[in-house]
Image: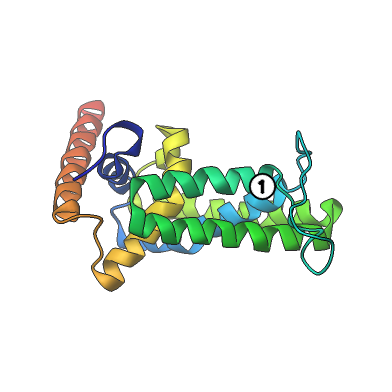
Amino acid sequence: MGKPGLLDLEKHFAFYGAYHSNPVNVFIHIIFVWPIFFTGLILFYFVPPVYDVQFLPSGLFGSALVLNFSFLFALIYALFYFCMDKKAGSLAALLCFTCWVGASLIANRLGYSLAWKVVLAAQVICWTGQFLGHGIFEKRAPALLDNLVQAFLMAPFFVLLEILQTVFGYEPYPGFHARVEAKIDAEIKEWKEKKQKKVS
């Protein structure tokens, strides 16, 4: 069964799913969400850490892998996903740390003067794609306009769970998807009724 409060995956997934019910919009998010996370880590790499810790000796990767804000950002996401669901969360955590390693190596290689331009271009492309997905296909504003923190935290995990469910039929526990779909349908119905009242 689901967990209470902040770790209630069912609640989080239903919230995010209510804003992403169109399959084309979901596909667009699958393409663009993780690159947003990845390039965000590149930018966080350059935020000066409170205490600089380099946990690997200098060498091929050592100088790039530093316990900085990029690492902290990846760690928070990884722990959040793992605590919500051990199986899918473990995979999500692995992806988070893989992104951190890759982002650190790229950031270290490019340097700030070039890296921020690459990040800016990638972020503009990815965000534009997602807003177009909402405007053209979903016909509903993105979730971040209603709950910024929840939308940013859940987005990478949501698309991963969508892939796992679609390809492998995975669900965190028996009945998860049926319960979530019922909540999504109810939320969408409520949203449409409110929208209709505003129009009439």
Q: Residues within 10 Å of mark 1 (few under 14, many from 20)?
A: many
Q: Residue 151: where, in percent of width, then height? A: 43, 41
Is residue 25 visible from the viewing direction of this image?
no
How does the figure colour the protein chain or chains? Answer: rainbow
Q: Residue 152: where, in percent of width, then height? A: 48, 42
Query: Which residue is located at x 27 percent, y 64 percent?
Result: 165
- Dividing the image into 4 quarters, which one contains the C terminus? top left
Say which of 65 and 44 sits in front: 65
Residue positioned most to the bottom = 167
For label 1, the SS is helix
Quarter-of-image position of residue 195: top left
Say which of 140 and 14 sits in front: 14
Query: Which residue is located at x 60 percent, y 56 percent?
Result: 38
- Dividing the image into 4 quarters, which one contains the N terminus? top left
- Above or below: residue 22 compared with residue 60: above
Count the marks: how many?
1
- Above or below: residue 191 compared with residue 128: above
Residue where numbered disc 1 is placed = 70
Q: Residue 13: where, in percent of width, then height? A: 30, 46
Say which of 87 and 158 sits in front: 87
Q: Residue 101: where, in percent of width, then height? A: 66, 61
State left or right for residue 16 relative to residue 133. Answer: left
> Amino acid type of disc 1?
Ser
